[in-house]
Image (cartoon, rainbow, N blue to C red):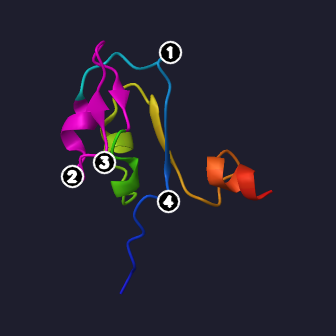
């Protein structure tokens, strides 16, 4: 059985590509994402992320990316090295 690790993933949102459509927020099953005052996605529930990547997969603009802890751009990885 695969263990689901909560809260170890980074979510990167590129506002240069994002058009604030809300699809990533709508598809997130863990309420990780919410909309800011300009309707852009933010991550107030990041600790609940289970890496399902539904937000990334449904983004029509490729503006969101989920980074695992081992990724060189992940903040926890950078802190450890």
- Which quadrant of the rendered structure holds the C terminus? bottom right
The mark nearer the N terminus, 3 or 4, is 4
Q: Horizontally, is 68 left or right of 21 in the view? A: right
Taking the spot 64% from the left edge, 47% from the top edge, the residue there is 75
The mark nearer the N terminus, 1 or 3, is 1
In 3D space, how far apart are the residues under numbered discs 3 and 4 (Cα atoms)? 16 Å
Taking the magenta stretch, the answer to whether it contains residue 13 is no
In 3D space, how far apart are the residues under numbered discs 1 and 3 (Cα atoms)? 20 Å
The mark nearer the N terminus, 2 or 3, is 2
At label 1, counting other C-alpha atoms closer than 10 Å, the crowd grade (few under 14, some 14-19, many 20 or more) is few
Q: Secondary structure at mark 2?
A: loop
At label 4, counting other C-alpha atoms closer than 10 Å, the crowd grade (few under 14, some 14-19, many 20 or more) is some
* Residue that mark 4 sits on: 8
* Number of on-image labels: 4
Give how far across and how far down residue 54 sits, in percent. 31, 48
The mark nearer the N terminus, 2 or 1, is 1
Residues at circles 2 and 3 in contact by the CB criterion of under 8 Å: yes
The mark nearer the N terminus, 1 or 4, is 4
Taking the spot 27% from the left edge, 18% from the top edge, the residue there is 39
Q: Secondary structure at mark 4?
A: loop
- Which quadrant of the rendered structure holds the N terminus? bottom left
| Residue 16, disc | 1
* Mark 2 vs mark 3: in front: 2
* Residue that mark 2 sits on: 29
The residue range painted magenta reads: 23-43
- Front residue (pair 64, 32): 32
The mark nearer the N terminus, 2 or 4, is 4
Taking the spot 49% from the left edge, 54% from the top edge, the residue there is 9
């Amino acid at each position: 059985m695969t263990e689901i690790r909560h809260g170890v993933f980074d979510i990167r949102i590129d506002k240069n590509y994002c058009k604030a459509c809300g699809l990533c927020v709508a598809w997130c099953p863990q309420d990780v994402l919410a909309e800011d005052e300009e309707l852009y996605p933010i991550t107030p529930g990041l600790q609940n992320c289970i890496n399902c990547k539904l937000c990334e997969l449904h983004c029509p603009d490729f503006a969101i990316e989920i980074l695992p802890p081992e990724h060189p751009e992940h903040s926890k990885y950078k802190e450890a090295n």
